[in-house]
Image (spheres, rainbow, N blue to C red):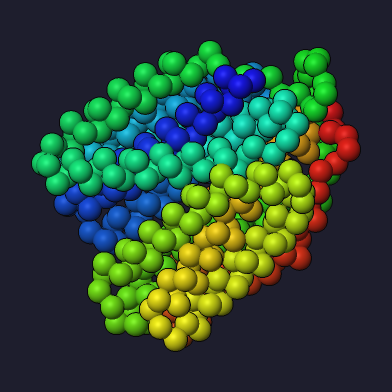
Amino acid sequence: MRQSRVGVAVVFALNGFLAAMWVAHIPVISTRTGVSHDQLGGLLLLLGASAFVGMQLCGPLIDRWGSRPTTVGAAALLSVAVLGPVTATGPVSLAAALAVFGFANGSLDVSMNAQAVVVEQAYARPIMSAFHGYFSVGSLIGSAIVAITLWADVGVVRTVIGATVLGLLLTAVVARSLTGRPVAAGDSESVDEPSGPWWRGVDLRRLVLLAVVAFALMLAEGTAYDWSALHVVETYGVRDAIGAITFGAFSAAMTIARFGVDRIAAVLGPVTVVRAGSLIGLVGMLTAIVAPTTVWAIVGWTVFGVGLAGLIPQIFTAAGNLTTNASGRSISLVVGCGYLGMLAGPAIVGFISSRTSLATALGVAVVALIIAIAAAGVVRPERTVSR
């Protein structure tokens, strides 16, 4: 299981790394393909939609064959698909490339989280948050490599070809260490294929509530990704570099905190982690909204990152432990709803801010965290796992 844990950590880091290859190259890709801002917005929606489709299709496959083959297949597909956007020559080819990339990314997102649940069950202690920390580390490494290669004029296609080769090699190396058989804690027997609807025996009320909380939390997280830098620049009239520092502080705080959340969850339990983390995030967001100076605003966004760091891992773990037979579909539903929240959050903030102010619009994240505080009990571990 130690090898499996390392393998899953590598997959999480690889996902973050490959995602950064696309995100950090967006300005270059936009110029190469000649897409306008409006077209790019539509293409990003296509990317999100295809990712959601991949998530939902992957769930049943995980329940049937386990998360190992789906994780390996999705990681290999994503490693190749990342070449699509940088080799696109126009809006049509870019749309096709992003549809494939989004599908692969959504499939890997569900598969690797299902794989992480299996490994965490075997460890019988919280380790999910650290996996998400490795995703953040991979993203930072990918972004740094893109920045260096662009500065050195290495060539976009050459850089991404290197990322593709690295992704395929890492996938091949860790494939054997992954484990795909879902087991309940303490259960050493394989699980038979269930009869009837997949949700039979699943606490649907709890599943829906987990999906709602995932939507709310990732809505809040998406708000930080798209609006933290702009909030500081527009509110305090500072340079764009200060905005970049703000987002960097948020990202760094979230990454570092994720590696410490598991120990806290082991001692205090996931309910306390979600409730206390949401409260910390709430304080951070309120500080950012009412901050009298730029420094205090940056502090607020940093605290916001610390609070959010360990929340989604608790939600995904709870979803994966709802049932053994339909763990993949439970995770795909919750992860999918969370992903929709991350897409919807920035759009909602933009809509409200255009009619009021950006500070007022950021109250959406405040409401999301209040929902998470109220519903924190949904992640309480059950003594038995439904079969």
Horizontally, residue 22 falls left or right of residue 315, namely left
Snapshot quadrant of residue 245: bottom left
Place of residue 354 in the rendered image (x, y in percent of width and height, measured from the top left): 41, 80
Which quadrant is home to the C terminus? top right
Q: How many marks?
A: 0
At horizontal 32% and vertical 75% (from top left) the residue drawn is: 233
Q: Residue extending furthest right?
A: 383
Q: Check the image and report above or below for 387 versus 277.
A: above
Picture coordinates of residue 206 (x, y %)? 79, 49
**At x 54% / y 42%, what residue is drawn?**
132
Residue 228 vertical placement versus 43 (above, below): below
Residue 341 visible to an observer of this rendering = no
In the picture, measured across the screen, residue 99 lies left or right of residue 300, that is left
The answer to whether residue 17 is left or right of residue 132 is: left
Q: Position of residue 13 (x, y in %)?
A: 45, 35
Among the 4 quarters of the image, the one containing residue 375: bottom right
Say left or right for 339 vs 169. right
- Which residue lies at the image location 25% right of the left edge and 74% below the top edge? 239
Residue at horizontal 50%, vertical 84%?
290
Q: In this rendered view, identify the residue nearer to me: 59 or 145.
A: 145
Q: Where does the image place residue 325, in percent across and percent down from the top left?
A: 76, 27
Outermost residue to the left: 153
Determine whether 64 is above or below 352 in the image: above
Residue in front for this viewpoint, 28 or 179: 179
Q: Where, quadrant-wise, is the N terminus in this rendering?
A: top right
Q: Would residue 48 be visible to someone looking at this image?
A: yes
